[in-house]
């Protein structure tokens, strides 16, 4: 047993000349909720497939639950749970038939299988739905069945690849409550998401750009590093056209649409928002209100993708 | 502004399930309308009926004044991106675009210009030789959207177009949508993302086959009579469990640095007292559209009900 649940050393995967994953190193603590973010095609799913023992690395290695992904992929697969992006359930079977089928694939049977089915159904709050047909279940419930499947063999580490894509807000909250419950019970959770509000729930976050890991830290440290300055949340009417006036205002680092309003990141001199309000009003906006807000991980994501060479470039250049 | 899409009293049943129970919606020229609702609310059924892919049991659909199920020619003016869009898996990105370009009879010059633009916006340009079935979920979505936009339709129907699409591409797709809408396209977009709903001119909230609310998102937020607060202090797990069990709590965000709750109208003091016993306090925060969604559809948060619903179906 290593002291970290996952240790990654110089992991790379090349497809011909394309470096899908390029010399990535990091570790994940036991019992941690670790978020893995990146643009489409940045190499997240390829990394996960290697860490799950489903795809061999071109170079480098990773130790997952004590097994080397290069030398012992089968040992890795037995030790981990994996919920893939396009998780598959047999929709013409009931919830418990699905679990029994997947349990059989993991070598569980008889009383042990029954016990584990009870335990995972309790964990995902679906004891009442066990005889429901999977086809009739809404997406958010089906996704919990898929999680239950991934947990049947009591893995110490679970990999969840975009588990909440397309799920409604209430179901997403319920799902994250489950993830926290798993982590509280000591399971290590490795999760990817494109919802940056969900990424806030992770203890630490790794951010991939074009195959490379460009950032890794806690959400608050990432914000301090990548989006320094004061973030102003601006609301009002006619902001869209007026926002261009901010491009030429000294001290404005970045302007981004955010919900129906704007997020404007400014240096210390503009921190009270008065100059931003004046500029917007002069450019034709009305009913402008400005409050200081916290940078979001979406701001971090945009900054990192725009300047993967490092946050210093963002701070100096005022990336747009 | 003229109406490009309109329904009246749409009903549609699947076996015992009434997916649509009298739905009236409309989209005007140059309008971006969001369609939101809990899983199973009827959003996908509505989009399929609007696209003429599914006939309603009762009610009418008019797209540019015509009925798409009786007059298929109107579909030439429509772009449709269903949730499970079928591209040719063994064709590359470039070949899929060529296929749809020929299908719509685009001239080479138009095709080349639009393809270049769409590939830039979707950031698919470096991957044009990759086969569609080797694309990640998000890249596949972006290709599907590019294919649906190739012929520059007057009316665009999108069913959850950004699921699995990363934040950078999502932002760029939204810029593209706003541009198309400014040029006069009418867009109806079903989405599970309340952040996206808040960027629409108007949002239709569908629940259990009926329209619960229809209006500009900022207006729906202003009209919300449910208090929205942040909870501070106390043991996080204990406080979260207490909130989940409290009858006045409509929704609680389970984790992150802060805990946010949506409460039943007029119940703030009751919840405040209950939390004080756990050493926690609350402070009001500005509501957003996600809070509106959670407040109006809170019955779906109840897990026991989800199970009961599943058994009943």
Image: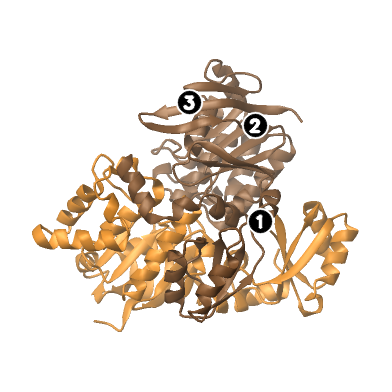
Residue at the spot 70% in from the left edge and 51% down from the top edge? B218
Q: Position of B41 compared to B6: left or right?
A: left
Q: Residues within 10 Å of mark 1 (few under 14, many from 20)?
A: some
In the displayed orientation, state which residue is furthest to the top. B70
Left or right relative to B230: residue A76: left
Assess disc 3: are there few (<14), some (14-19) or many (≥20) residues with their C-alpha within 10 Å of its C-alpha.
few
**Residue A104 appears in view:** yes
Could you say where residue B176 lies in the image, as x and y percent from the top left? 66, 45
Which secondary structure, mark 3?
loop
Q: Nearer the viewer, residue A100 or A20?
A: A100
B141 vs A3, left or right, is right
Q: Earlier in the sequence, mark 3 or mark 2?
A: 2
Name the residue beneath numbered marker 2.
B26
Q: CA distance from mark 1 to mark 2?
A: 23 Å
Q: CA distance from mark 3 to mark 2?
A: 18 Å
- Chain of the residue under label 1: A
Q: Is residue A115 above or below residue B310?
A: below
| Residue A112 occupies quadrant | bottom left
Q: Which mark is residue A259?
A: 1
Q: Colour of chain A?
A: orange
């Amino acid at each position: 047993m290593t002291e970290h649940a996952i240790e990654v050393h110089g992991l790379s995967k090349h497809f011909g000349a394309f470096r899908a994953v390029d010399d990535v190193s990091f570790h994940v603590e036991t019992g941690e909720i670790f978020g893995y973010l990146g643009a489409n095609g940045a190499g997240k799913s390829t990394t996960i497939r290697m860490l799950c023992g489903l795809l061999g690395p071109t170079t480098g290695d990773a130790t997952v639950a004590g097994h080397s992904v290069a030398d012992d992929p089968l040992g890795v697969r037995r030790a981990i749970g994996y919920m893939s992006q396009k998780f598959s359930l047999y929709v013409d079977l009931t919830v418990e038939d699905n679990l029994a089928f997947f349990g059989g694939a993991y070598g569980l049977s008889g009383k042990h299988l029954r016990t584990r089915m009870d335990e995972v159904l309790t964990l995902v709050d679906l004891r009442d739905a066990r005889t429901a047909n999977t086809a009739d279940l809404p997406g958010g419930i089906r996704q919990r069945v898929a999680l239950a499947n991934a947990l049947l063999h009591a893995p110490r580490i679970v990999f969840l690849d975009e588990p909440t894509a397309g799920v409604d807000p209430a179901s997403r909250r319920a799902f994250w409550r489950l993830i926290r419950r798993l982590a509280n019970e000591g399971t290590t959770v490795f999760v990817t998401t494109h919802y940056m509000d969900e990424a806030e729930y992770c203890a630490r976050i790794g951010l991939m750009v074009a195959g490379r890991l460009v950032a890794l830290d806690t959400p608050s440290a990432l914000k301090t590093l990548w989006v320094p300055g004061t973030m102003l949340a601006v609301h009002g009417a006619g902001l869209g056209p007026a926002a261009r006036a901010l491009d030429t205002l000294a001290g404005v680092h970045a302007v981004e649409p955010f919900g129906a309003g704007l997020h404007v990141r400014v240096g210390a001199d503009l921190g009270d928002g008065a100059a931003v309000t004046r500029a917007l009003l002069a450019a034709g906006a009305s009913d402008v209100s400005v409050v200081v807000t916290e940078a979001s991980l979406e701001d971090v994501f945009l900054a990192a993708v725009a300047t993967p060479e490092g946050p210093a470039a963002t701070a100096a250049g005022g990336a747009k | 502004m003229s109406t490009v899409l309109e329904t009246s009293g749409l009903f549609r049943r699947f076996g015992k399930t009434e997916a649509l129970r009298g739905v009236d919606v409309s989209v005007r020229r140059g309008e971006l309308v969001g369609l939101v609702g809990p899983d199973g609310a009827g959003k996908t059924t509505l989009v399929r009926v609007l696209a003429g892919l599914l006939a309603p049991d009762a009610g009418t659909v008019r797209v540019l004044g015509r009925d798409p199920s009786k007059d298929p020619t109107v579909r030439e003016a429509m772009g449709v991106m269903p949730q499970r869009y079928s591209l040719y898996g063994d064709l590359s990105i470039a070949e899929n675009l060529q296929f749809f370009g020929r299908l719509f009879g685009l001239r080479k010059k138009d095709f080349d210009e639009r393809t270049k633009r769409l590939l830039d916006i979707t950031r698919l340009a470096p991957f044009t030789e990759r086969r569609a079935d080797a694309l990640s979920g998000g890249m596949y979505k972006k290709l599907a959207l590019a294919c649906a936009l190739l012929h520059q339709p007057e009316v665009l129907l999108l069913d959850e177009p950004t699921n699995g699409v990363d934040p950078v591409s999502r932002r760029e797709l939204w810029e593209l949508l706003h541009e198309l809408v400014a040029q006069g396209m009418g867009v109806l977009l079903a989405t599970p993302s309340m952040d996206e709903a808040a960027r629409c001119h108007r949002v239709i909230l569908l629940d259990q086959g009926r329209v619960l609310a229809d209006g500009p998102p900022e207006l729906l937020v202003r009209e919300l009579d449910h208090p929205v607060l942040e909870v501070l202090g106390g043991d996080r797990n204990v406080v979260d469990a207490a909130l989940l069990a409290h009858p006045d709590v409509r929704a609680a965000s389970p984790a992150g640095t802060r805990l946010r709750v949506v409460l039943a109208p007029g119940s703030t003091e009751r919840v405040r007292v209950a939390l004080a016993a756990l050493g926690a306090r609350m402070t009001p925060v500005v509501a957003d559209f996600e809070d509106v969604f959670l407040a109006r559809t809170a019955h779906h948060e109840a897990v026991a009900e989800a199970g009961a619903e599943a058994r009943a179906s």
